[in-house]
């Protein structure tokens, strides 16, 4: 049973939780919970939390923010969907297919980076995408890794009919690949780097560099909570860009920050910097705003929603990819304007760029 399928079985409970918090979602509050999981582009949250930067910005706006590291990525989004967290680090696709698809209005608060090599397709025997034909492919089924595989196959004249997908938790990605039975996997860093370092037969045959901008890593927030409590958005955005500013360059402080992030990610400085090289991280609010405001984002999300619809991830019985509305920074809408459940809001990042936080 896949992680998302198991989520469906618990969705009634989740929906009840969502409705229970919805009555309070529009209320002002002073305490918030934020979830994140291990990934190169999200490691700044570890530093920002542990070194007091999140607290500094929360104090500025008179609120408290508890930042929680989750070991299971999909579970963190499930809990966000159930109302256990007010914000959560997730990809653009997973924001669409989990919270938005289950009726939770979700805002992409910070589009922090896109994968530019941090996702890879690895094979033990062969040196091309064509060589995976007939193989099982281990990945987190119906996640962004599944989308990544579909794009790789399509770009090489193949389809999922040519392979068999085997659901594998991100936490188990490395250990399963080391077994004799597993020959192909679609994984992200840091698991990808570990596999390439430790599995002598592993060859990377496709990376996210070949689909730039399509796999976006962001901090998403519950829209109703955010609208009622803009202080949360200001504090998170402020803490994020302060952390990114100090981790750049060759100063002792920057090296110490990246070293800390590396240790928290289970690697060393060189390993983490290699992962950063495969991450198009938007270090400044200006660059993040430019990406989030670019019309290309609509095209990226159109590809993602079509894949999600084809896989039945937009809700049981969905008549078309238009079933969920997605609103962008210029207020344009892709999909149903009467059912907007995913928003890419540039307001807070623009405030950071303008020095208004």
Image: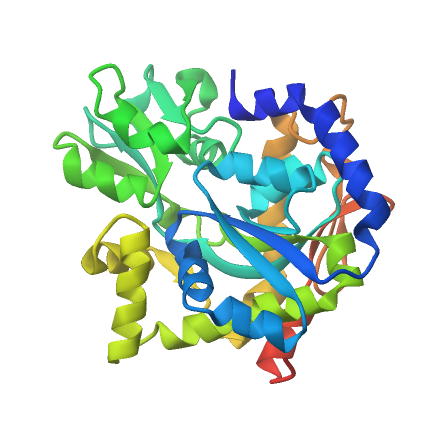
Expressed as whole percent of the image width and height from the top left, the position of residue 220 reads 62, 53
Residue 129 at x, y percent in the picture = 31, 31
Q: Is residue 57 shown to the viewer in this render?
A: yes
Which residue is farthest left? Answer: 200
In-front residue for pair 312/211: 312
- Colouring scheme, one of rainbow, by chain, secondary structure, one colour: rainbow
Residue 304 in sight from this viewpoint = no
Q: How many marks?
A: 0
88 horizontally vs 39: left or right: right
Residue 94 shown left or right of residue 201 in the figure: right
* Image coords of residue 146 (percent x, y): 47, 31
Location of the C terminus (image quadrant): bottom right
Please tell me which residue lies in front, 38 or 52.
52
Q: Is 46 left or right of 224, judged from the image as shown?
A: left
Name the residue nearer the viewer: 178 or 59: 59
Within the image, what quadrant is residue 203 found in?
top left
Q: Residue at x 49, y 54 (%)?
A: 213
Q: Give the residue drawn at x 27%, y 55%.
A: 263
Q: Which residue is rendered at x = 43% and y = 20% of the image?
A: 165
Q: Position of residue 48 (x, y in %)?
A: 45, 65
């Amino acid at each position: 049973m896949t992680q998302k399928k198991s989520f469906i079985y618990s969705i009634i409970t989740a929906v009840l939780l969502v409705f229970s918090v919805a009555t309070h979602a529009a209320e002002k509050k002073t305490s918030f919970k934020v979830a994140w999981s291990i990934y190169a582009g999200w490691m700044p949250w570890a530093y920002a939390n542990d070194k007091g930067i999140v607290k500094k910005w929360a104090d500025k706006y008179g609120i408290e923010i508890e930042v929680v590291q989750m070991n299971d990525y999909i579970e963190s989004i499930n809990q966000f969907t159930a109302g256990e967290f007010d914000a959560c680090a997730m990809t653009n696709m997973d924001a669409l297919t989990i919270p938005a698809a289950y009726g939770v209005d979700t805002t992409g608060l910070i589009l922090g980076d896109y994968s530019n090599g941090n996702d890879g397709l690895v094979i033990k025997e062969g040196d091309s995408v064509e060589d995976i034909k007939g193989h099982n492919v281990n990945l987190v089924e119906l996640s962004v890794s599944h989308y990544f595989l579909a794009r790789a196959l399509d770009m090489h004249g193949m389809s999922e009919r040519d392979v068999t997908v085997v659901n594998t938790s991100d936490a188990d990605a490395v250990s399963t690949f080391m077994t004799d039975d597993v020959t192909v996997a679609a994984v992200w860093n840091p698991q990808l780097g570990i596999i390439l370092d430790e599995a002598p037969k592993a060859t990377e045959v496709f990376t996210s560099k070949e689909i730039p901008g399509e796999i976006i890593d962001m901090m998403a927030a519950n829209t109703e909570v955010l609208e009622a409590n803009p202080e949360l958005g200001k504090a998170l955005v402020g803490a994020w860009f302060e952390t990114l500013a100090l981790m750049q360059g060759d100063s002792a402080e920057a090296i110490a920050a990246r070293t800390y992030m590396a240790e928290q990610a289970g690697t060393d400085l060189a390993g983490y910097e290699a992962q950063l090289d495969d991450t198009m991280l938007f270090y400044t609010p200006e660059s993040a705003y430019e990406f989030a405001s670019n019309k290309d984002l609509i095209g990226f999300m159109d590809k993602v929603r079509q894949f999600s619809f084809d896989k039945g991830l937009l809700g049981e019985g969905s008549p078309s990819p238009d079933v969920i509305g997605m609103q962008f920074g210029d207020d344009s809408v892709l999909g149903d304007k009467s059912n907007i459940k995913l928003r890419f809001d540039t307001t807070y990042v623009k405030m950071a760029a303008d020095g208004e936080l």
